[in-house]
Amino acid sequence: MRLIQPVPPSDKVVPDKVLRLAAPAVLQPFLNAYSIQNGSELTQSPGLANYILVYSEPSSIDAASVRIDHSFGSKLQLFGRYAYTPSGGWYFNDLPIHDNIRVNVQSVTLGATSMITPPRPTNSVSTLRITPPENMRSPPTSAARPQLASALLTDPTGSH
């Protein structure tokens, strides 16, 4: 699945054209590193102007799983399931930097269903499913700030 999350426009303050041209040559590369204004000049702050940032944050999630079922006669059925769910996306951390996040989640589930025949004429069915408490998850990767990605993906309560 591919998603594009729109982000509301935000105003940033950047050097205006006049300040860029009037600055000493040694400072011009630093001023030119900022985006070029696309909004109005700030009347209360000469030399500064608005830059309206409009963007979206794309993300993706894929899923693949395998399930195997097996019956041992009419009274016992077993199954096992393995799932692999890689996902990723990016977001703006600050102009002009954006962070990439990639997470790979793997899970395993095992289950059994058995038919118990008590002495009474009615039968009952028992089901047991086991999923390890800590499914396998690769550490997240982030281009600029891996500790931030880890904090975003860690559950502070310890439950999964």
Image (cartoon, grey):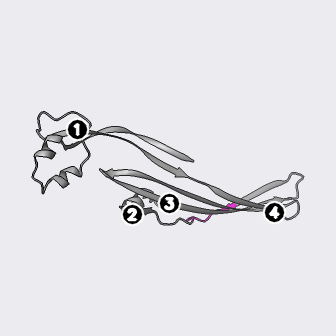
Is residue 153 found inside the magenta-colored segment of the image? no
Crowding at label 3, few (<14), some or many (≥20) Cα neighbours within 10 Å? Answer: some
Tag 4–tag 1 contact (CB < 8 Å): no
User: Who is closer to the viewer here, 104 or 98?
Assistant: 98
Residue 146: assigned label: 2
Nearer to us of marks 4 and 3 is 3
Q: Residue at x 42, y 52 (%)?
A: 90
Q: Residue at x 36, y 61 (%)?
A: 144
* Left or right, 17 with reference to 141: left
1 or 2: tag closer to the N-terminus: 1
Question: What separation in Å lies between label 3 and label 1 (alpha carbons)?
Answer: 36 Å
Residue under label 3: 103
Nearer to us of marks 4 and 1 is 1
Question: What separation in Å lies between label 2 and label 4 (alpha carbons)?
Answer: 42 Å
Residue under label 1: 50
The percent position of residue 85, horizontal first and vertical second, equals 58, 58
Nearer to us of marks 3 and 1 is 1
3 or 1: tag closer to the N-terminus: 1
Amino acid beneath label 3: Val
The span shown in magenta is 129-135
